[in-house]
Image: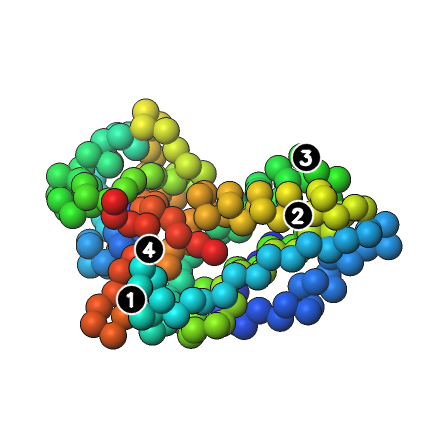
Amino acid sequence: MIRITEEPLNTQAIVDSVISPNGGAVNVFIGTVRNSTKGKEVVRLEFEAYEPMATKELTKIAEDAKQRWPILKVAVHHRVGVLDISEIPVVIAVSTPHRAAGFEACQYIIDTLKQTVPIWKKEIFEDGEVWVAAHP
Amino acid sequence: MKVKLFGITREIVGGPILEVDGIGTVGELKAFMMSTYPRIKKLNSLMVAVNSEYAKEDLALHENDEIALIPPVSGG
């Protein structure tokens, strides 16, 4: 299931949603808000999404991953809005018959998400703010 | 036609929607945005989505298309 939401992500529920009787492994990626960037203290992050397109792009990534690896179930949940340090902006869970494919698929999904999905994050500092990746 | 704006481009333009006229293609829209808002030129990249799909420069724009500027993404 693909979901973009303002609500806090329930990691256990997302993991449970991909568990399959045919599966031997669930691989999970959890992104968390880090308290610094390039040595500078981050106060919080603000995420926004172009929602229908972001869901569409995430669905494409999940479908691509299913073509490349023997995935049983996949879930990608991304949060938007204001997130404090250590909160969870993204959870990806993939179930596969064997573990190797799950590791690879999970990495593929997060790497591609960061390149193509129209979601943006702003880092808020004590003395300013920066849209991540906007400038060289 | 209306152009949806997000992230840094929303802040540069000063609102979530911009009305533009006389723009024929994706390439023309990008050129217009960059000349009207020079700060957009300094971004790492600028894409345009038409009806929720990334669009090529030569794609023609129509009044009823859903058009969005996509500045460099940074999800995850």
Mark 2 or mark 3, earlier in chain: 3
Amino acid at the residue labelled 3: Gln
Q: Disc 4 sits on a residue from what chain?
A: A
Q: Callout 3: helix, strand or loop? A: helix
Q: Position of residue A113 (x, y in %)?
A: 50, 47
Residue farthest toward the right in the current orientation of the protein: A21
Q: Disc 2 sits on a residue from what chain?
A: A
Query: Do tags 2 and 1 sit on the same chain?
Result: yes
Residues at marks 1 and 3 touching, judged by CB atoms closer than 8 Å? no
The residue sitting at 82% across, 52% down in the picture is A24
Q: Callout 2: helix, strand or loop? A: helix
Q: Left of A90 or right of it: where is A123?
A: left
Q: Which mark is residue A132?
A: 4
The residue sitting at 44% across, 54% down in the picture is B75
Amino acid at the residue labelled 1: Lys
Cα distance in 3D space between marks 1 and 3 = 40 Å
Cα distance in 3D space between marks 2 and 3 = 15 Å
In this orientation, which residue lies closer to the viewer: A61 or A114? Answer: A114
Q: Callout 1: helix, strand or loop? A: strand
Q: Which mark is residue A103?
A: 2
Query: Do tags 3 and 4 sit on the same chain?
Result: yes
Cα distance in 3D space between marks 2 and 1 = 31 Å
Q: Which quarter of the figure is the C terminus of chain A placed in? A: top left
Q: Left of A14 or right of it: where is A44?
A: left
Check disc 1 and report the residue beneath it. Answer: A40
Please tell me whether residue A135 is drawn above or below residue A121 in the rendered image. above
In this orientation, which residue lies closer to the viewer: A129 or A61? Answer: A129
Circle 4 packing at 10 Å, graded few (<14), some (14-19), many (20+), is some
Query: Do tags 2 and 3 sit on the same chain?
Result: yes
Query: Do tags 4 and 1 sit on the same chain?
Result: yes
Q: Disc 1 sits on a residue from what chain?
A: A
Q: Nearer the observer, disc 1 or disc 3?
A: 1
